[in-house]
Image (cartoon, rainbow, N blue to C red):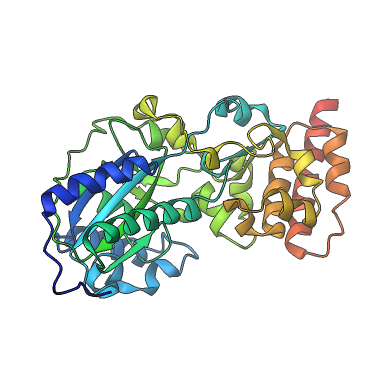
């Protein structure tokens, strides 16, 4: 979109302040601005080294777009500034995460995925923000994102001063911990930029120490191939057997590194209804979920980020959880009911789970 030549240039300092007010009214808890031409050389070198070492696993899209992730003008040539926003997602009245994780029989789902798909919510609100700017100053060039294009979200949020990159690689804020979604708007407006803040992780290594699969191989360095979030969401194949017992009952994502982070004592409960718990997914048994047919899966998870992994991957994940659960006849029967499933992937993980249950039964008898 092109600006109208007859339109009076706005006061960009005042506009930036107004954008923050509009952003807050739309549900974003913080909004900062970065220069699209900021020095990202260190980030770029780190990204390519990470890719060369294969730490991205099967996420080929991480390498597909080259330097577009770190050079916004290669993606959108007219970009001058990047507006980064945060939206809290911690839902209210949720079953304690550690209680669910340690229960064995319940399914743990990462707390960000208990409600509506955040991609849709954040992008829609950013579009509303863009509309407000357009109404105020006239047409301008922009593009909105929420984990939806080759954008280094955490790096740009860090450049803007929204927070710092924690040792677990997520963005951390002194005001809100890490339990928030990020979104960006690339704009061609010469808005005043904000300054980055320091790193406040200090000597803490709790996130590294607690990772069930030791996927955080060094501070600020994640091997996605070992990460439970990657394995249960991004990875489509057979989960390596040595990692299966370490996954426990985490069937969609993993929050351990966030749950143990001291900064998350400042995490805010969301007032966004779309992120509230749906269908009791914060405290539901593995057996119940494994009993869902595909129609139930698609109906109950309509509008959810979980639905994107598909029914087969969903059952694969739950089968591992059932294999790791304490022995019970109900679990064995649930697994046996799918032992001849049409999917080879499901059959493989069901057989593994049945073997785990059998070994536990033998141990219990002794």
Residue at the far front: name it.
Answer: 6
139 over 296 or under it: above or below = below
Considering the image in quadrants, where does the C terminus appear?
top right
Q: Position of residue 220 (x, y in %)?
A: 31, 46
Q: Position of residue 322 (x, y in %)?
A: 74, 41
Q: Residue at x 35, y 44 (%)?
A: 86
Quadrant of res 83: bottom left
137 and 115: which one is in front?
137
Q: Position of residue 313 (x, y in %)?
A: 67, 57
Quadrant of res 54: bottom left
Q: Position of residue 273 (x, y in %)?
A: 53, 38
Q: How many marks?
A: 0
Q: Is residue 256 visible?
A: yes
Q: Is residue 356 visible?
A: no
Q: Residue at x 65, y 60 (%)?
A: 238
Q: Is residue 224 left or right of residue 131?
A: right
Considering the image in quadrants, where does the N terminus appear?
bottom left
Q: Residue at x 18, y 49 (%)?
A: 16
Q: Is residue 235 left or right of residue 104?
A: left
138 and 24: which one is in front?
138
Q: Residue at x 14, y 74 (%)?
A: 5
Q: Is residue 63 left or right of residue 96?
A: left
57 over 210 or under it: above or below = below
139 over 299 or under it: above or below = below
């Amino acid at each position: 979109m092109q600006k109208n030549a007859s339109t009076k240039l706005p006061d960009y300092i005042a506009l930036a302040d107004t954008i923050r007010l509009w952003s807050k009214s739309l549900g974003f808890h913080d909004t900062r601005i970065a220069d699209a031409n900021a020095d990202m050389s260190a980030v770029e070198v780190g990204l390519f080294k990470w890719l060369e070492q294969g730490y991205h696993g099967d996420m080929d899209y991480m390498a597909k777009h080259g330097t577009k992730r770190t050079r916004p003008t290669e993606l959108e040539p007219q970009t001058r500034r990047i507006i980064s926003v945060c939206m809290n997602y911690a839902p209210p009245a949720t079953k304690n995460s550690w209680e669910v994780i340690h229960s064995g029989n319940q399914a743990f789902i990462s707390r960000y995925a208990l409600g509506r798909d955040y991609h849709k919510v954040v992008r829609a609100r950013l579009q509303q923000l863009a509309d407000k700017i357009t109404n105020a100053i006239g047409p301008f060039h922009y593009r909105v994102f929420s984990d939806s294009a080759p954008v280094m979200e955490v790096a740009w949020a860090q450049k803007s001063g929204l927070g710092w990159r924690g040792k677990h690689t997520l963005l951390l804020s002194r005001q809100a911990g890490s339990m928030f979604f990020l979104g960006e708007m690339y704009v061609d407006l010469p808005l005043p930029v904000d300054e980055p803040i320091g790193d406040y992780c200090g000597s803490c290594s709790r996130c590294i120490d607690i990772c069930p699969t030791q996927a955080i191989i060094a501070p600020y360095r994640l091997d996605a191939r070992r990460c439970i979030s990657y394995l249960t969401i991004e990875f489509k194949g057979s989960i390596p057997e040595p990692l299966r017992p370490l996954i426990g009952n985490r069937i969609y994502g993993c929050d351990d590194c966030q749950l143990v982070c001291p900064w998350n004592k400042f995490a805010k409960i969301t007032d966004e209804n779309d992120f509230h718990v749906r269908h009791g997914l914060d405290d539901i048994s593995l057996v119940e979920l494994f009993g869902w047919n595909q129609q139930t899966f698609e109906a109950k998870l309509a509008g959810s980020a979980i639905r994107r992994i598909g029914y087969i991957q969903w059952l694969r994940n739950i089968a591992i959880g059932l294999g790791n659960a304490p022995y019970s006849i109900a679990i064995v029967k649930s697994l046996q009911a799918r032992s001849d499933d049409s999917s080879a992937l499901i059959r493989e993980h069901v057989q593994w789970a049945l073997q785990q249950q059998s070994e536990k039964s033998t141990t219990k008898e002794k």
